[in-house]
Amino acid sequence: MPIIQGYRIMARTKKVTTHEILDAIERVVVKLGVSRLSIDAVAQEAGISKSRVVYDYKSKTALLEALIDRQFQRDKERIGMLVRECAESPHPELFARIKLAEQAPDDIERAVAMAVSSSMSSEVSLQRKMREWTVHDLKAMEAGEKPEAARIVYFTLIGFNCHEWFGLVNWSSQERYSFLEGIRAMYASHPESQAPTTHTT
């Protein structure tokens, strides 16, 4: 403990914001992978006490949920802006998501995708969050004139994205734009059914 001119100065505890803790969670996942994500690892990365992390996040699952929520919020904000940019397109909600895919995923997006994939089988809360996000997107697909076509193209786009998120494919810029143009054309050319299909068991 430092002493200045005869006065004992109490060492100050490092104060961090929730935003900074979330940054630390992301860095741990990117550097070490989800298997080594822990409250201790986040505290060490952020340079704060374990109790400070526990105050906001009680478990590894809570850390993962925070990671997913942050990525969803980022995507929601970006899609919101792109929907406005695509307002004159045949289906703004769908075409905004296609436009978002024009940018290759970064290390954080890949790390979050891997973390979610490896943890979903054992974490019911993560399954629920992913299901809610999918429902949110599928409702957005109903907003255009051809909802059936939009759903089909949306799932095609998810397949495209997943291969990149998991590092299975590395598209060149030319390949990326060509593929996404094909996805847009798929929507334009797909005939919309006159009546919903009835599934029987």
Image (spheres, rainbow, N blue to C red):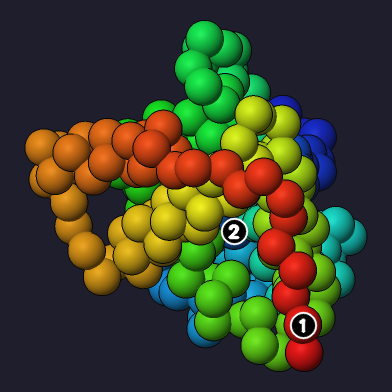
Residue located beneath label 1 in the image = 200
- Report the disc number at residue 119: none
Residue located 18% across and 38% down the image: 178
> In this view of the protein, which residue sits in the foreground, 86 or 163?
86
Q: Is residue 185 above or below residue 170?
A: above
Label 2, residues with CA under 10 Å away: few <14, some 14-19, many ≥20: many
Residue located 54% across and 35% down the image: 94
> In this view of the protein, which residue sits in the foreground, 172 or 145?
145
Where is residue 171? Give x, y as percent.
17, 51
Query: As shown in the figure, which amino acid type bears the numbered disc 2?
Result: Ile
Judge whether residue 93 can be spotted in this image: yes
Which numbered disc, 2 or 1, marks the residue that appears first in the sequence?
Answer: 2
Q: Which image quadrant: the C terminus?
A: bottom right
The reply, left or right, for residue 119 in relation to residue 107 is: right
Image quadrant in which you'd find residue 119:
bottom right
Q: Is residue 42 above or below residue 136?
A: below
Where is residue 1? Give x, y as percent.
71, 51
Mark 2 vs mark 1, CA separation in Å: 46 Å
Image quadrant in which you'd find residue 169:
bottom left
> In this view of the protein, which residue sits in the foreground, 16 or 73?
73
Residue located 52% across and 9% down the image: 88
Q: Disc 1 on helix, strand or loop?
A: loop
The reply, left or right, for residue 18 in relation to residue 177 is: right
Judge whether residue 1 can be spotted in this image: no
Residue located beneath label 2 in the image = 25
